[in-house]
Amino acid sequence: EDYEMMFTYQALLLVGHTVAAICPGKKAGETIKTAVHAGVPGAQTFGEDEGHNFKLTHTFDDIKPEEWDAISIVGGRCPEYLRTDEKVLNLVRHFLDKNKPTSAICHGIQILLSAGIKDRTVCC
């Protein structure tokens, strides 16, 4: 989801954080295509338009979770596919197991649930 990715990334940078934008199977400098979802007049669903080509800042396989303070998972379509990726789930489990700040936007909750979030206080 374009807005979820772009806004989260830019807002965290704005307040001084180092942010790793990553995607499994992708390397730093490669891009991922995002989508913009908008309401369809008269329908109970959303349309999907092409968003930006978002440039990744880090290589997924090079990320060492112990070197990072928090994780934020965006929604959109990606969680439908990434919720079964063991590398993704193990990365998220590190943050959950170490009680590091962990957030998910919209469909990103699917990844938290698949990673085994339990016995936690969750705010939606």
Image: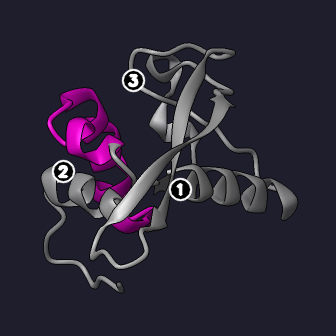
**Residue 32 in magenta?**
no
Are the residues tagged 3 and 2 within 8 Å (C-beta)? no
**Magenta highlight on residue 82:** yes
Does residue 69 appear in this view? no
Where residue 24 is drawn, which disc sits there? 3
Residue type at mark 3: give it.
Answer: Pro
> Secondary structure under badge 2?
helix
User: Which residue is painted at 48% across and 23% down in the image?
Assistant: 60
Circle nearer the viewer, 1 or 3: 3
Q: Above or below — where is 12 with respect to 123?
A: above
Kindly state the secondary structure of the residue where label 1 is placed.
loop
**Residue drawn at x 18%, y 50% as measured from the top left:** 115
The residue under label 1 is 70
Rendering coords of residue 31 (x, y %): 61, 21
Q: Residue at x 14, y 52 (%)?
A: 114
Q: Which mark is residue 58?
A: none
Callout 3: 10 Å neighbours few (<14), some, many (20+)?
few
* Extent of the magenta region: 78-106
Cα distance in 3D space between marks 1 and 3: 18 Å
Location of mark 2 (residue): 115
Name the spot of residue 97 as percent of width and height, x first.
Answer: 28, 56
Which kind of residue does numbered mark 1 sit on?
Answer: Ala
Residue at disc 3, secondary structure? loop
Give the main secondary structure, helix, strand or loop, of the magenta stretch.
helix
Given residues 123 and 67, the one toward you in this image is 123
Relative height, residue 26 to residue 96 (above, below): above
Q: What is the three-letter code of the residue carrying label 2?
A: Ala
